[in-house]
Image (spheres, helix red, strand yellow):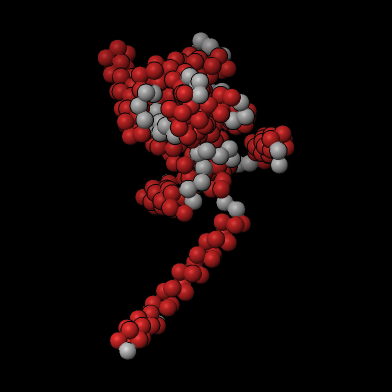
């Protein structure tokens, strides 16, 4: 398939999934809508994270910071602004923070970049907590103006669809190729004329804008928010896990993994939170060891290779445990002595 055919295929798949998701509030229960809302949230977060971090191989742990900034902005602005304006304000402030943060830390790579982004997330969380305690005299915000359930659902769905569509088009632009070039060899990309610093900051800000908008839309789900809830590091960690297990470099991997994680979360987290965390760790280990391309890289050839590898492993173990291996070694030694 050529590039145009792939684009048409991706848009048709996105259109079909969007149509199915649009009908869910009309026939689904409250539980199904709540689970779908969580799924759509992580589709948007992990897709935007994968678009930047998967392409450039910069491991950012700042998703929860931008999510929390958007949530707090929405909580403060909903009484004065409309619903769309509050979401836009959350995305805008998160983008500004990302530009400042990116300018400060995007010259680092690897562990240093990951640790610094996580540290800045914690710094923002504690700064918000300190401000509320010292200035406002309280911790947390009660959202008096809360839109209807369907409004929130359709908004998060629109954000998820827009993020996947953005990923589809950015991957086909020079900007997307520049991100991939940075991930492959940043110095070579720089010598070829790519302004790597500007591209990295723009990509980082794009990820932050999505996270801020999603945080602003999801803040009304709780009706009461505090720094511990919206700046929860687990949101950032789970976004990274979903992207990595689904396939951070791929288009549909984060979406597939978001569905899997949402099902796991709703079935295990409330009843057996320890098993849920163990399942996350096991999925990550298996993905890294046996599926480095993520769930999106699964093909029939992958299963066939696993089956052939399993049969070969069983044959070798049978050969060893039956004693044939020891007997063959003894015969070879005897032949050498003769």
Q: Nearer the viewer, residue 100 or 155?
A: 100
Quarter of the figure with residue 65: top left
In this view of the protein, can residue 69 be seen by the observer?
no
In this view of the protein, can residue 265 be seen by the observer?
yes
Q: Is residue 22 left or right of residue 93?
A: right
Q: Is residue 330 left or right of residue 66?
A: left
Quadrant that contains the N terminus: top right
Relative to 143, residue 272 above or below:
below
Residue 248, image x, y percentages: 50, 39
Quadrant that contains the C terminus: bottom left
* Residue that appears at 44% across and 37% down: 240
Residue 252, image x, y percentages: 59, 40
Residue 60, image x, y percentages: 40, 31
* Residue that appears at 37% across and 23% down: 107
Q: Nearer the viewer, residue 141 or 163?
A: 163
Count of marks placed on residues:
0
* Residue that appears at 56% across and 46% down: 296
Residue lying at the far top in this picture: please name it.
80
* Residue that appears at 44% across and 20% down: 197
Q: Is residue 212 left or right of residue 11?
A: left
Residue lying at the far front in this picture: please name it.
338
Relative to 10, residue 133 above or below:
above
Residue 22, image x, y percentages: 67, 34
């Amino acid at each position: 398939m050529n590039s145009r055919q792939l684009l048409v295929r991706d848009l048709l798949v996105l259109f079909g999934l969007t149509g199915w998701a649009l009908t869910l509030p009309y026939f689904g229960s409250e539980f199904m809508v709540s689970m779908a809302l969580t799924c759509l949230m992580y589709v948007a977060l992990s897709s935007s994270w994968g678009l930047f971090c998967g392409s450039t191989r910069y491991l950012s742990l700042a998703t929860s910071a931008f999510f929390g900034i958007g949530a707090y902005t929405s909580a403060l602005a909903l009484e004065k602004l409309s619903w769309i304006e509050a979401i836009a304000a959350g995305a805008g402030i998160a983008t500004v923070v990302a530009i400042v943060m990116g300018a400060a830390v995007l010259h680092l790579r690897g562990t240093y970049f990951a640790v610094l982004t996580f540290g800045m997330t914690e710094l923002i969380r504690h700064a918000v907590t300190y401000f509320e305690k010292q200035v406002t005299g309280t911790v947390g915000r009660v959202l008096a103006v809360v839109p209807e359930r369907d409004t929130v659902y359709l908004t998060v769905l629109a954000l998820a669809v827009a993020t996947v569509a953005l990923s589809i088009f950015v991957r086909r632009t020079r900007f997307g190729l520049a991100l991939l070039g940075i991930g492959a060899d940043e110095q070579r990309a720089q010598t070829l004329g790519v302004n790597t610093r500007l591209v990295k900051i723009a990509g980082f800000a794009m990820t932050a804008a999505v996270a801020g908008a999603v945080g602003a839309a999801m803040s009304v789900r709780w009706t009461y928010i505090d720094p511990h809830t919206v700046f929860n590091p687990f949101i950032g960690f789970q976004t990274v896990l979903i992207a990595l297990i689904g396939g951070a470099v791929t288009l549909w991997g984060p979406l597939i993994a978001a569905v899997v994680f949402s099902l796991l979360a709703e079935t295990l987290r409330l009843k057996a939170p320890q098993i849920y965390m163990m399942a996350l760790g096991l999925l990550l280990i298996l993905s890294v060891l046996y599926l480095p391309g993520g769930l999106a890289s699964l093909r029939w050839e992958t299963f066939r290779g696993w089956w052939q590898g399993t049969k070969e492993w069983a044959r070798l173990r049978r050969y060893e445990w039956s004693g044939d291996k020891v007997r063959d070694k003894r015969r070879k030694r005897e032949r050498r002595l003769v």
